[in-house]
Image (tube, grey):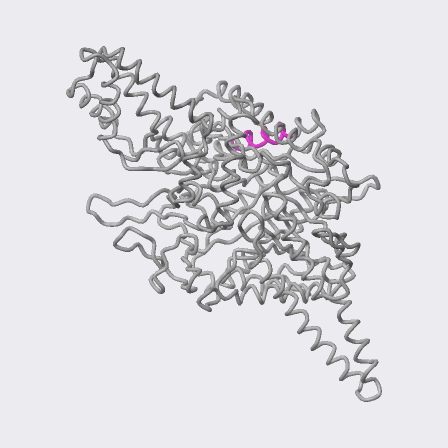
Amino acid sequence: MKVIKRDGRAVDYNRDKIVTAIEKANCEVRPKERATKEEINSIIQYIQDLDKKRILVEDIQDIIEEQLMSHGRYELAKKYIVYRYTRALVRKQNTTDESILGLIKNQNKELAEENSNKNAVLASTQRDYIAGEVSKDLTKRILLPEKISKAHEEGILHFHDADYFLQPIFNCCLINIGDMLDNGTVMNGKLIESPKSFQVACTVTTQIIAAVASNQYGGQSVDLKHLGKYLRKSKEKFKRELEENYKDKLSQEMIDDMVNQRLKTELAAGVQTIQYQINTLMTTNGQSPFVTLFLNLEEDDEYVEENAMIIEEILRQRYKGIKNEKGVYVTPAFPKLVYVLYEHNNLTGGKYDYLTRLAVECSSKRMYPDYISAKKMRENYEGNVFSPMGCRSFLSPWKDENGNYKFEGRFNQGVVSINLPQIGIVANGDEDKFWKLFDERLELCKEALMCRHYALLGTKSDTSPIHWKYGAIARLKTGETIDHLLKGGYSTLSLGYIGIYELTKLMKGVSHTTKEGHDFALKVMKHLRETTDRWKKETNIGFALYGTPAESLCYRFARIDKEKFGEIKDITDKGYYTNSYHVDVREKIDGFQKLAFESEFQQISSGGAISYIEIPNMKNNLKALEEVVKFIYDNIQYAEFNTKSDYCHVCGFDGEIIINDKNEWECPQCGNKDHSKMNVTRRTCGYLGENFWNEGKTKEIKSRVLHL
């Protein structure tokens, strides 16, 4: 049995600690009021007979109190209760000591595994985590209404990013990189003028990315179509210089050839600058910038040919990878890549099909890019194609005072997610009870989201000049507030949701892939969407339904519900809930069926949605991948590939990570045991909990995602 401490650590159950605690309380009462050894053993046996795999330390203490009173030891129970209350008051005054000290000593497992992109051992990361623990403490005790904090603790909802709530900063954005490059910007009080070449434009872009990432806590995206102009500037510059120096000495053909050679060199150097700067820069929160590059080739763009060259070079360099400390080419975590499929590159004879084939080849080896169908996105967003913020959160269409759609320079204020399976557990098949409870909890989510909105109201442009004064979001005056950008739908507040599959199983007894389950799931999804739309009308704030807020939340909600309600077959016994509307990994459904099925849900979940399919041995299945990409273009807005092979980021091993004799994941090629530097993908049934020893003491791997 594992005991879950208050700071989230799981420790081995130790009966001696219970004996010690009761004996200490015994010393505080008269001899005749003390618990006997037999009574103490009886209490311990009662706890052990519960036969739980995990138990909260508070639950153990509750049981001790109840059992002491059942044995008639009322005075002793009173002493124990007073002691607990006194300790609780101390903790309420300062709840960060244990978690921070555990972090410094590398014992805080919850923080260490919270973000796979952050190394909790590094001093810079620890500094951010320490600040985050203080923020979470103040958020829980002071900044949030008590009922919101309580709902978060009980897993009714999840108040995302409480570790940054103390500051007036927001979640994610689409950087208005075109405006910043064309009209200049300011960083650290220094004017950065519009670049005169592609290489300089790439350098400035990465500097902007780092500055923006340091002043928000979520992802950011850059549409690379704005760099095409600067590649042409470089070409024109090279041509001008060469013609001035060699017009009378060389033929025009030779000059043009020299121009093209110099341009290719500059192109490769510029893209390499983007890739290496993003992976070597460190933001103030102790990680590389969480940035997505939007590979968006619009055929009517004036610079379409230059942008095609840029996209090709980005894909080639990503396919090659980046050398790690051992000199081995590995897959970098950032930047994320999102590739847009149009009529001219959807592998049906278009002019730019060669780019899509290169993208597919890159996906087969490096997992990226993800794919957006311009065709389906136009259907869902009033004819527009634009990047997600980070890699999954989408804005709603918004028009400026001139009636023009605007997406770049907009942002998300924050996220709150609702635990759908827990509502199903409590409703216990009673639909009337379910819908009533559903609406009650949705209103609680709205109140939590409004806390995020109110926390940003009154924020002045000086708080983050790169965002508010110098173009990433706006160009406000010094001292001007951002309030008007928080209203009217310019920015969004996201309602996330977890567990459509589990909720449907609880309420209907079947998966949402069946006819009955599908109808119910669709009704729930439409109610979520209608609710956020209603909130938007009531408040004039851009509420949005967000389908994929956090994979780790799938485990947190499931863990809380298992501890609270016990093991429920096919619900809490799995150790995870299924993310948003996704089909459960154990469903017998092929990739094409899965994408087609989930497309309907993506359309409803317009504030954020992505679907994935797993394909084994992707490098040997390029033709199959191309068929999937064709299917994506015609059938679903946004999709990605996962592979069923493991991967070691230290040595580049691409096979199956093993379990060694010490019950650790280990790369068979280089011996790497660092979970943050390996992928261990889903295997067998798709179970995502901890591995275990079966009765025959043979390791059973039901998969564990350590860094996906």
Q: Give the range drawn in magenta.
A: 521-532
In the rendered image, the residue lying farthest to the bottom is 249
Image location of residue 234, percent across then percent down: 75, 69
- Describe residue 505's horizontal placement relative to residue 266 as left or right: left
Look at the magenta stretch and give its main secondary structure.
Answer: helix
Image location of residue 94, percent across then percent down: 46, 29
Against 578, residue 240 (above or below) is below
> Residue sitting at 24 percent across and 44 percent down?
694
Against 466, residue 365 (above or below) is below
State the image quarter where residue 41 is shown.
Answer: top left
- Describe residue 161's horizontal placement relative to residue 572 as left or right: right
Q: Does the magenta stretch include residue 416?
A: no
- Describe residue 591's horizontal placement relative to residue 666 as left or right: right
Q: Is residue 525 magenta?
A: yes
In the rendered image, which quarter contains the N terminus?
top left
Q: Which of 86 and 121 is in front in this view?
A: 86
Q: Which of 378 and 18 is in front in this view?
A: 18
Image location of residue 109, percent across then percent down: 39, 42
State the image quarter where residue 197 is shown.
Answer: bottom right
Against 679, residue 7 (above or below) is above
The tally of labels here is: 0
- Describe residue 312's horizontal placement relative to residue 479 as left or right: left
Q: Which of 680 and 113 is in front in this view?
A: 113
Image location of residue 655, percent across then percent down: 38, 61
State the image quarter where residue 670 is shown.
Answer: bottom left
Q: Which of 88 and 522 is in front in this view?
A: 88
> Residue sitting at 53 percent across and 46 percent down?
611
